Image (cartoon, rainbow, N blue to C red):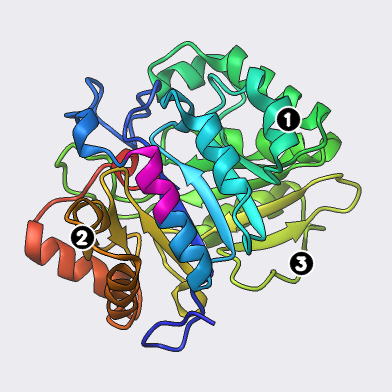
């Protein structure tokens, strides 16, 4: 079993395959986008496969593909197919904004993608445009319909933002009344990539829960699965469930089992750290799998205790907050 220096199991990897995105959500990146990575700076599919294969052999059991938006990468489906065939991998998931996803759903189902996280912060088309700066709401909803029609496990991720979409909390909760989806509300995080100072959190997980209880006082706490980042709830009579992720409050660090690899090959042992080593550079420098494995094990044995420790170290070193698009959000 793969563990870190705090005795926590490491079994889940989030692999960001691109920093590019076809939306411009204000909480993720500036309106004009980012200074996109050049093709040579990105890991190739072959390098990603080598990395995934090695980490699965080391003990990674679950891989989730993220971006940016994964479907803007042209070779995504062959890459997913290859990863799905890795011996020892127990679960393959995908996070998407849904804009380009609908036509690929049958193939995703066929190759064994078990779960899809769909980013959707509002059910109001006008607010969707305000938040994302793009008129793509209809395509996202079509993707949701396609996923459900193919009996895929769907988790809807909604970032809760003061003054932007708090009026959408109850409508999103009610989406789980008739649909077998998990609607998960996420605390806003300081990763917009525009250099602005983050002023703190006004809607934490407790306030989000209170908002839901105001309409549904009968909401019941569920047992959370091992390593869950969400507090999970059920409203009697609803087909789906509700989750609240304390991403900024960081209440789940003590059981965190995940690592991240960015599109340029940076290993992040914590969402809030600055990246601890570049795997792409090691591979291109001719490092063997044995060297890569030993280097990874060293990194895992220097993992921060929690996100607060990691954030302090990163800000002290760089003085900036990254964009979520560049780190697999």
Residue 265 placed where, x, y %? 28, 50
Residue 239 placed where, x, y %? 86, 44
**Is residue 3 placed above or below 89 in the rendered structure?**
below
Secondary structure at numbered mark 1: helix
Location of residue 37 by image quarter:
top left
Q: Nearer the viewer, residue 123 or 315?
A: 315
At 56% from the left edge and 16% from the top edge, which residue is drawn?
Answer: 137
Mark 3 to mark 1: distance in Å?
A: 25 Å
**Is residue 4 placed above or below 164 in the rendered structure?**
below
Q: Please identify the quadrant where the N terminus is shown.
A: bottom right
Mark 3 to mark 2: distance in Å?
A: 34 Å
Q: Nearer the viewer, residue 210 or 101?
A: 101
Q: In this view, does 50 lie to the left or right of 264?
A: right
Label 3 sits on residue: 222
Magenta residues (range): 44-50
At 35% from the left edge and 51% from the top edge, which residue is drawn?
Answer: 189
Q: Tell which circle, 3 or 2, labels the residue nearer the N-terminal end.
A: 3
Q: How crowded is mark 3: few (under 14 residues within 10 Å), some or many (20 or more)?
A: few
Label 1 sits on residue: 147
Q: Tell which circle, 2 or 1, labels the residue nearer the N-terminal end.
A: 1
Q: Nearer the viewer, residue 59 or 316?
A: 59
Label 2 sits on residue: 274
């Amino acid at each position: 079993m793969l563990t870190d220096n705090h005795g926590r199991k490491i079994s889940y990897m989030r692999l960001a395959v691109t920093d590019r995105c076809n939306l411009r959500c204000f909480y993720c990146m500036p309106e004009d986008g980012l200074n996109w990575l050049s093709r040579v700076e990105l890991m190739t599919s072959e390098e990603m496969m080598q990395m995934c294969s090695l980490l699965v052999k080391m003990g990674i059991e679950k891989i989730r593909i993220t971006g940016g938006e994964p479907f803007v990468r042209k070779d995504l489906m062959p890459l997913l197919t290859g990863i799905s065939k890795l011996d020892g991998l127990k679960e393959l998931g995908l996070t998407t904004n849904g804009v380009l996803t609908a036509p690929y759903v049958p193939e995703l189902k066929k190759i064994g993608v078990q779960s899809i996280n769909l980013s959707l912060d509002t059910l109001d088309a006008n607010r969707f445009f305000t938040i994302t700066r793009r008129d793509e709401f209809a395509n996202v909803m079509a993707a949701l319909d396609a996923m459900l029609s193919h009996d895929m496990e769907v988790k809807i991720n909604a970032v809760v933002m003061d003054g932007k979409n708090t009026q959408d909390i109850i409508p999103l909760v009610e989406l789980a009344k008739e649909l077998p989806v998990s609607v998960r509300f996420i605390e806003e995080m300081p990763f917009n990539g525009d250099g602005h100072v983050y002023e703190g959190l006004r809607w934490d997980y407790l306030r989000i829960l209170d908002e839901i209880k105001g309409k549904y006082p009968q909401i019941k706490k569920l047992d959370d699965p091992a390593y869950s980042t969400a507090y999970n709830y059920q409203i009697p009579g609803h087909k789906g469930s509700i989750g609240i992720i304390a991403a900024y409050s960081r209440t789940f660090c003590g059981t965190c089992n995940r690592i991240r690899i960015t599109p340029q090959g940076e290993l992040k042992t914590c969402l809030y750290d600055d990246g601890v080593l570049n795997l792409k550079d090691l591979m291109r420098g001719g490092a063997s799998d044995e060297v890569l494995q030993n280097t990874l094990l060293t990194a895992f044995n220097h993992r921060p205790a929690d996100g607060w420790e990691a954030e302090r170290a990163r800000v002290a070193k760089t003085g900036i907050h990254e964009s979520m698009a560049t780190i697999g959000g």
